[in-house]
Image: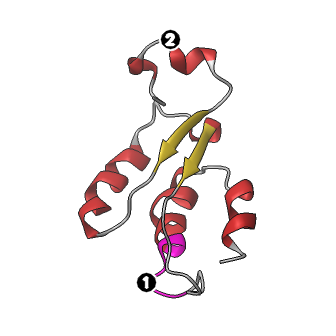
Amino acid sequence: MLSPRSGTAYGSKANARIIAATGASQFEFLDELTKAAEIDWTRAEMFHLDEYLGLPGTHPASFRKYLLERLICKAGIPHITCSTAWATL
């Protein structure tokens, strides 16, 4: 979806949307994905489907913390729109 190899949809859209999974099984995948030079992460809009209710984003078990550290900040995904919603959890 974000890579030029995936076809014309990449060039015809203002942004690309991705859904990110969390967990230890994703460590290697996210590490390799964030190294992919051909991905324009500034055009990515990321969605995540779950979080522990009431858990602060600074808690080690927080999925927000996980995604900020392993994907959003590392790749440079603009996250202002999701951080506002996340702050209310």
The numbered disc on residue 8 is: 2
Question: Mark 2 falls on what kind of element?
Answer: loop
Whichever of labels 1 and 2 marks the residue nearer the N terminus, that label is: 2
At x 32%, y 68%, the residue is: 23
Is 88 above or below relative to 85? below
Was residue 80 drawn as part of the magenta stretch in this picture?
A: no
Q: Position of residue 59 (x, y in %)?
A: 52, 88
- Marks 1 and 2 sit apart, C-alpha to C-alpha, by 38 Å
Name the residue type under label 2.
Thr
Is 40 above or below relative to 48? above
The numbered disc on residue 27 is: none
At x 44%, y 53%, the residue is: 20
Was residue 63 drawn as part of the magenta stretch in this picture?
A: yes
Q: Quadrant of the C terminus?
A: bottom right
Question: Mark 1 falls on what kind of element?
Answer: loop
Q: Position of residue 28 (x, y in %)?
A: 26, 57
Disc 2 crowd, CA 10 A, few/some/many (<14, 14-19, 20+): few
Q: Which residues are magenta?
A: 59-65
Name the residue type under label 1.
Ala
Q: Position of residue 24 (x, y in %)?
A: 27, 69
Disc 1 + disc 2, Cβ < 8 Å: no
71 to the left or right of 28: right
Q: Position of residue 41 (x, y in %)?
A: 57, 41
At x 45%, y 29%, the residue is: 1
Q: Which residue is mark 1?
A: 61
At x 30%, y 63%, the residue is: 27
